[in-house]
Amino acid sequence: MLTLTILLAAILVILLYGAYTEDAKGTTLLTGLAALIAAVPLIMQPTTGALFQTDNGPLLLQTPLSNALWLITLLLTPAVLALGASNTKVTAKPEFSLLTLLSVAGALILITSHDFLSLYVGLELMSFPLYILASFQRDNARSSEAGLKYFILGALASGLFLYGVSLFYASTGSTNFSAALPLGTMPAAALTFMLVAFLFKLSSAPAHFWTPDVYAGAPTPALGIIATLPKLAVIAVLLRVLHLPLIGSLSLWQPVLLAAATLSMVWGSIAATTQTELKRLLAYSTIGNMSFMVLGLATGTPAAAAGTLFYVVTYILGTLGLLAIFRLLEDEQGTGPRNADGSEPARVTGHPSRVRGLPPQAESQLSTENLKGLLSRRPLLTVALAINLLSLAGIPPLAGFMAKLNVLMPAVNAGHIPFVLIALASSIVALYYSLNLIRHAVFSKPEKASETSQLPTLNVQLSTVVILTTVAALILGLFPGLLLTPLTILTTAFF
């Protein structure tokens, strides 16, 4: 509880600080510092137990597992904030950091929820800042479209979730997770509506349709939070929802999750092969990666749960690494020739990637063309790009391989052989489009060569994120027990 209190107090302080100073860099620094300070009680003196007790049970329940997930979330927050380190219109306002911290607070509430009412509060507190962040670049049509689509479809998902909760209450007389859900048509409908809402937040099929447009339109710094920490929070609360009130109703939810996993595997892998825009390709890669996590949830064993949590952490690290590389490329893109005649275009002060004479829609839309000649320009950045891509594709000895292995092995033991085979096929396709990106970076030459001496200096914060995520992909691949063993112990105790 102390951690959440520190975080909420920090939100008020940062709100006042940003209102009076409009100091974006100072606000970002305070936000990252607040996340790290809030993590200290979880390390020094973690507590467990019920919070906000009601007649039907607690609204929040802290466990050793939830404390560990809180710690992971808070430690990853500075890396998310670092994506907005360079000078852009998106992060030049203190509201960006404040909205990020509000979303993190919602994620923490979501992770510890033990009642559908507190779950809904946490879900909305986490989601609503994301809608604003997606449309934060108001003069960019694609950003405004992304925010509008995300908001409308997110409101629909929230409505479906509330309808499912009402059916759950009608079936059990309680909204607390400790209520056992009986078999029947109404309980099945309740679970289906709630699962659709959760699958929407996970970008999992068949509720994935918002993901490509939002990923492509949202500013890259905002995408850093949209694509990462909410996934961990939703996976954590799904473990609690599915294995507490529904533990005796495996037949109700397992087929839905298996079907969702299969659809995500097929659609995510196939659609990604046709993409040339990098953030849209990352969206379909996310859909494919979510299928492995959903498969782990459907398996329903402690080993599968630990593997799923390990998977989501490695996914977050790989995604943050790629987005940091994308930000570096966006900064570099604003320095090269952009006019039709090859001359240097005029640039608007305060935004290195905005160019006069180009429509707002053309801003920061990275494609495979921007990767051409990357090896000659940025050899170390090319190595980091390859490692993060191959990790997400599941190539040994990287972290993504161990993550997929620890999800698929419990599924094999549970008898889900057909789904494992589909997952392996989707991984092969993921390897194809990952290698295609690496091919563009290594072997393709740009239409006009850039002078290495004229390249701008890489942003320190973004470069640090790239280094840390790349090293983490190697370390967790070679020594997965550093994270997997604690998660296995905690999930076994949870079950």
Image: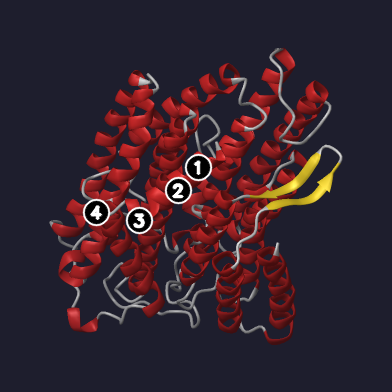
472 sits left or right of 297 in the view: left
Q: CA distance from mark 3 to mark 1?
A: 15 Å
Residue at the image position 57 percent from the left and 71 percent from the top: 40
Tell me which residue sits at (55%, 82%) in the image. Answer: 25
The amino acid type of the residue labelled 2 equals Leu
Q: Amino acid at mark 3?
A: Leu
Residue closer to the observer: 142 or 129: 129
* Nearer-the-camera pick, 477 or 338: 477
Question: What residue lies at 69% left-to-right and 63% top-to-bottom?
Answer: 4
Q: Which of labels 4 and 1 is toward the front?
A: 1
* Distance Cα–Cα, label 4 vs label 2: 17 Å
User: Looking at the rendering, which quadrant does residue 34 occupy?
Assistant: bottom right
Q: Residues within 10 Å of mark 3 (few under 14, many from 20)?
A: few
- Dot 1 surroundings within 10 Å: few (below 14), some, or many (20 or more)? many
Which residue is under mark 3? 482
Residue sitting at the far top = 184
Q: How is the image coloured?
A: secondary structure
Horizontal and vertical percent for residue 331? Answer: 38, 73
Residue 487's disc number: 2
Marks 2 and 1, how far apart at CA: 6 Å
